[in-house]
Amino acid sequence: MKIRQPLSLYLHIPFCISKCRYCDFLSAPSTDKERAAYTDLLCREIRQQAMRFTEKVRVDTVFFGGGTPSLLTPDEFGRIMDALWESFSIDSGAEISMEANPGTLTWENAVRFRQEGVNRLSLGVQSFDDKTLRFLGRIHTADEAREAFLLARSAGYRNISIDLMSALPGQTKEAFRRDLEAAADLSPEHLSVYSLIPEEGTPLGDAYLAAEGTGEPPAGFPALPDEDTDRAIYHFTKAYLEERGYERYEISNYAREGHVCRHNLGYWTDHDYLGFGRGAASRLFDLRLKNPEDPQEYDRYVRFLEREPGAPAYEAREVEKTPLTEAEQMEEYMFLGLRYIDGVSEAAFETRFQRQMQEVYGDVIRRHVGEGLLARKDGRIALTDCGLDVANRVMADFLLSVS
């Protein structure tokens, strides 16, 4: 299999203390014994996956997501990092990120995680309003979120991100303004602000989806903000954070100079990535893979790797395999790249596919440039401010089967 270096690594930790009402990620409460067993499997998978390559693959970013990676004990986390250092050639300046729930961060594990290599912490705060946090099912309070941030600073972290959610049930622009001010007042290096999407299969999502068409929110639930309020919050976020020294570099992400999330930037700029753990996804040039989500299937998958040292992971029947056609690779290149505020390089597209972007997407680009939704400047195609408001519609036009 062809692989482009450097590679990004993602490690999925599918555990949490309790499931939030909006969460559709692969995560669930767990016991100490289950986390210890999972750590063992994860380390075994890392070492076996690395044997697929003829030499140590260079890695420039590592991201621990979940779930709640900060639920791991320092010793468990250290074992995983040892497996990574042994198996891959991790750059000395690599970005190593960990998602952390403010309700799980202690002085001891914050210090130990940093000693083991974590140099970027992403705190899932979501809101600084206690009533909202209780409604969402979060395990922390607003004060505990502030305390976790200050604890992380004291533990030596100089690159901290705060995650916030907008368009929450009952949320007004004024209420969100208070959340955003509280986050910015802590002076993190990075902020992610995502609009809530009620997902089917979650308690919150199922309630709102069931009430669709009635004109009323579910019984006992506040109404979701209307579209005008959602857009007003979105535009306010950009303007306010710019005043506070943050630049929007992706549709939902803002950073101070030098602190963009390099791992996520790789997803938007066609970086190959390798995922470890239950449900983790990989994309290696022209093949997309997904690890099994079921615990027993994941165990069988790791045992397959051990029975067949060096065998490609896609040979395991438990792994989902999706070969990407050239058209699908182009589609992904464009609609992921357009999330990036600087847009997509025409020269890089030609290098990647040996075809000019205008040859493939000329009609689509001309139409949206004419509508003021795309701009073509300095050899790049990017969404305008108006285009960002209807980004999903614009990106859909880059699907070659329907464009």
Image (spheres, rainbow, N blue to C red):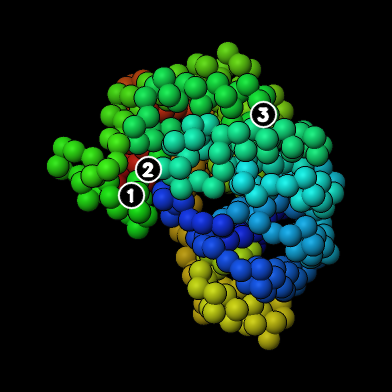
Looking at the image, do the residues carrying marks 1 and 2 touch, with CB atoms under 8 Å apart? yes
Q: Amino acid at mark 1?
A: Gly
Q: Is residue 402 above or below residue 161?
A: below
Q: Nearer the viewer, mark 1 or mark 2?
A: 1
Q: Which mark is residue 197?
A: 2
Q: Amino acid at mark 2?
A: Ile
- Name which of mark 1 and mark 2 comes first in the sequence: 2
Q: CA distance from mark 3 to mark 2?
A: 25 Å
Left or right, 129 with respect to 56, comes to left
Q: Is residue 278 above or below residue 357?
A: below
Please give the residue where the numbered disc 3 appears in the rendered image. 188
Please give the residue where the numbered disc 1 appears in the rendered image. 205
Q: CA distance from mark 3 to mark 1?
A: 30 Å
* Element marked by disc 3: loop
- Name which of mark 3 and mark 1 comes first in the sequence: 3
* Element marked by disc 2: loop
* Element marked by disc 1: helix
Q: Quadrant of residue 227?
A: top left
Looking at the image, do the residues carrying marks 3 and 2 touch, with CB atoms under 8 Å apart? no
- Name which of mark 3 and mark 2 comes first in the sequence: 3
Looking at the image, do the residues carrying marks 3 and 1 touch, with CB atoms under 8 Å apart? no
